[in-house]
Image (tube, rainbow, N blue to C red):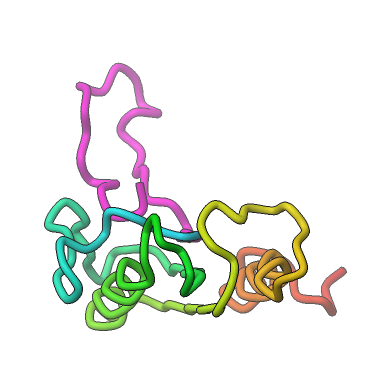
């Protein structure tokens, strides 16, 4: 969604369909299918300077969508000049989601919230 926002799959039926579908930000949490190999971004993921600011989170022991997925995506985002923040954790596996665990990765929602404040998507702590 955050990289294919210009692609329309149906003809506009009203004014709402003519609005941009570019999201204001993206959170790529244990991302997958982003790399065709260790060093090449999937061509179906068109990263450009218009890609929204992106927060990337990955566990190094995710053996479903390995850490290379996040690394290739992060590199492409940085090369395109997209504001990006990435966090890698040693443990967490795949699909850790929001459930509490003993691993430090369980605290990722607070990191994402802080990041959203830094890019202006949430009010700063002083604005509460």
Image location of residue 98, percent across then percent down: 69, 53
Residue nearer the viewer, 103 or 26: 103
Position of 128 with respect to 6 (left or right) is: right
What residue is at 54 percent from the left and 62 percent from the top?
A: 93
Region of the chain picked out in magenta, as a range: 1-27
Image location of residue 87, percent across then percent down: 53, 78
| Above or below for 12 versus 88 | above
Position of 100 with respect to 63 (left or right) is: right
Position of 28 with respect to 38 (left or right) is: right
What residue is at 82 percent from the left and 76 percent from the top?
A: 125
Q: Quadrant of residue 73?
A: bottom left
Position of 100 with respect to 19 (left or right) is: right
Q: Quadrant of the image for the C terminus?
A: bottom right
Q: Is residue 46 magenta?
A: no
Q: Quadrant of residue 48?
A: bottom left
Residue nearer the viewer, 107 or 81: 107
What residue is at 36 percent from the left and 26 percent from the top?
A: 15
Residue nearer the viewer, 31 or 84: 31
Q: Is residue 15 magenta?
A: yes
What residue is at 36 percent from the left and 43 percent from the top?
A: 21
Q: Quadrant of residue 102?
A: bottom right
Image location of residue 84, percent across then percent down: 43, 77
């Amino acid at each position: 969604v955050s990289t294919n926002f210009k692609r329309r799959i149906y003809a506009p039926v009203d004014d709402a369909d003519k609005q941009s579908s570019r999201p204001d930000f993206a959170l790529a949490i244990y991302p997958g299918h982003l790399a065709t190999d260790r060093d090449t971004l999937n061509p179906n993921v068109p990263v450009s300077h218009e890609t929204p600011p992106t927060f990337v989170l990955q566990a190094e022991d995710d053996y479903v969508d390995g850490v290379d997925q996040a690394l290739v995506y992060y590199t492409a985002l940085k090369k395109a000049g997209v504001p990006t923040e990435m966090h890698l954790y040693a443990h967490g596996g795949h699909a850790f989601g929001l459930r509490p665990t003993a691993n430090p990765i369980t605290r990722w929602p607070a990191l994402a919230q802080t990041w959203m404040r830094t890019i202006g998507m949430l009010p700063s702590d002083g604005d509460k």
